[in-house]
C-alpha cells in the first residue's frame, strides 16, 4: 500500500494524460484524497495509464508525427499495390501446356522368310488340296474277290495268308461265287450313292473349282511320289455340262466303232485313223467341223444355265 502523500507526488509527476484516460485518473485521485489507500494492482494500472499517456503526449507534441504517419500510410499503400500487381501478374501468366506423351514406338516389322522352291511347291500343293476337296469314299469298284477276302479276314483275324484266300476263292462253287458277286454289287451301289450324295452337298461352282485344282495337282505331282494320285482324279458331277467334243474326236469315235480295225491294237489303230484324218479334204472334214461347232454351242448354253443357278 502507498501513503496518500506519496500518491499525490506520483500524480504530480505524471505527464498530461490523454482525454479518454482522465475519468479513471480522476477517480483514483479522489480516492487518494479521501484517505483511502490504493492497492498495488491499482498502482500498476496507474503506471499503465502513465506510460500510455506519456506516449500519446509525446506523439501529440512531436512536430514530425504527421509526416511519419503519411510515410507509413504510403508504405502500407505501396505494399498493397505491390501485392495486387503481383497477383495480377501471376493471374496473367499463361498456364504451361501439358507435355505431349511420346507416341508408342511401332514394333519392328518382321522380315518375311524367303522360301525355297521346294517350300513354295509344298505350300502350293497344300493350298490346292484344300480346294480340291476329298471324297468320303473311293469310286473304285470292289470285286467279288475283294469282298470275299474282306469277310474272311474278319473271321480269321488276319492270320491266313492272302495266297490261301486266293486259292480257296478259286475252288468255290458257282452258287457261292454268285453270292459274292451279289454282295460286291450291293457294296458298289452303296458306295456310289454315298459318293453322289457327297457331290450334291457342294455347289456346281465348288466342284468346278475343285476339278481345276485337281488338274493343277496332277501337273505338279507328275513324276513325284508326293501323295500319289490322291485328289487328282476329276470329280464326276452330272450337274456339270459335258465338255464339248472336237471334230477330230468325233471322227475318231466314228472310225473306231467300224469293223475296219478289228484285231488291230489301239496304238496302231490310232496311227491309222490319224493318217486318214490328215488325208481328208476340207469338204470332207466340214461335216465333223459342224458337229463340233454345234457341241460347243450346247456346252455354252449348259454352262450359262449352271452359272445362273449358282448365282
Image (cartoon, rainbow, N blue to C red):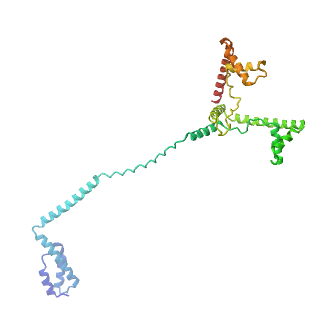
Left or right of 204, for residue 102: left
Left or right of 217, for residue 98: left
What is the quadrant of the N terminus in the image? Answer: bottom left
Q: Give the residue at x 22% y 58%.
A: 82
Left or right of 79, for residue 190: right
Instruction: Report the number of numbered marks.
Output: 0
Up-down: is 204 above or below 76? above
Depth check, front residue: 294 or 201: 294
Residue 122 position within the rendered picture, expressed as x and y whole percent measured from the top left: 60, 40
- The answer to whether one can see residue 154 in this image is yes
Up-down: is 21 above or below 207? below
Q: Quadrant of residue 5?
A: bottom left
- Residue at the far top: name it: 283
Residue 148 position within the rendered picture, expressed as x and y whole percent measured from the top left: 83, 40
Residue 168 position within the rendered picture, expressed as x and y whole percent measured from the top left: 86, 41
Depth check, front residue: 235 or 91: 235
Q: Give the residue at x 24% y 59%.
A: 83
Q: Give the residue at x 19% y 60%.
A: 78
Depth check, front residue: 88 or 17: 88
Residue 297 position within the rendered picture, expressed as x and y whole percent measured from the top left: 65, 20
Depth check, front residue: 283 or 26: 283
Up-down: is 267 above or below 279? below
Q: Quadrant of residue 209?
A: top right
- The answer to whether one can see residue 27 in this image is no
What is the quadrant of the C terminus in the image? Answer: top right
Amino acid at each position: 500500500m502507498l501513503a496518500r502523500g506519496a500518491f499525490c507526488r506520483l500524480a504530480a509527476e505524471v505527464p498530461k494524460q490523454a482525454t479518454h484516460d482522465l475519468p479513471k485518473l480522476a477517480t483514483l485521485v479522489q480516492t487518494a484524497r479521501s484517505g483511502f489507500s490504493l492497492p498495488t494492482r491499482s498502482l500498476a494500472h496507474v503506471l499503465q495509464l502513465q506510460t500510455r499517456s506519456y506516449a500519446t503526449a509525446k506523439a501529440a507534441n512531436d512536430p514530425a508525427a504527421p509526416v511519419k504517419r503519411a510515410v507509413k500510410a504510403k508504405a502500407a499503400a505501396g505494399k498493397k499495390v505491390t501485392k495486387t500487381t503481383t497477383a495480377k501478374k501471376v493471374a496473367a501468366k499463361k498456364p504451361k501446356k501439358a507435355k505431349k506423351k511420346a507416341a508408342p514406338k511401332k514394333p519392328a516389322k518382321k522380315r518375311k522368310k524367303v522360301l525355297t522352291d521346294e517350300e513354295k511347291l509344298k505350300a502350293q500343293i497344300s493350298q490346292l488340296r484344300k480346294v480340291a476337296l476329298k471324297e468320303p469314299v473311293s469310286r473304285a469298284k470292289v470285286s467279288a474277290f475283294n469282298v470275299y477276302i474282306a469277310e474272311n479276314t474278319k473271321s480269321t483275324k488276319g492270320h491266313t495268308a492272302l495266297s490261301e484266300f486266293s486259292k480257296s476263292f478259286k475252288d468255290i462253287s458257282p452258287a457261292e461265287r454268285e453270292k459274292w458277286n451279289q454282295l460286291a454289287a450291293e457294296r458298289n451301289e452303296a458306295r456310289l450313292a454315298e459318293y453322289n450324295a457327297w457331290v450334291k452337298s457342294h455347289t456346281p461352282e465348288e466342284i468346278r473349282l475343285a476339278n481345276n485344282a485337281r488338274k493343277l495337282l496332277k501337273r505338279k505331282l507328275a513324276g513325284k511320289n508326293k501323295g500319289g494320285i490322291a485328289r487328282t482324279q476329276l470329280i464326276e458331277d452330272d450337274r456339270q455340262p459335258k465338255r464339248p467334243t472336237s471334230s477330230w474326236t468325233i471322227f475318231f469315235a466314228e472310225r473306231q466303232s467300224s469293223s475296219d480295225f478289228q484285231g488291230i491294237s489301239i496304238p496302231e489303230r490310232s496311227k491309222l485313223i490319224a493318217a486318214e484324218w490328215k488325208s481328208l479334204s476340207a469338204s470332207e472334214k466340214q461335216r465333223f467341223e459342224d458337229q463340233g461347232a454345234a457341241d460347243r454351242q450346247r456346252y455354252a448354253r449348259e454352262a450359262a444355265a449352271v452359272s445362273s443357278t449358282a448365282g
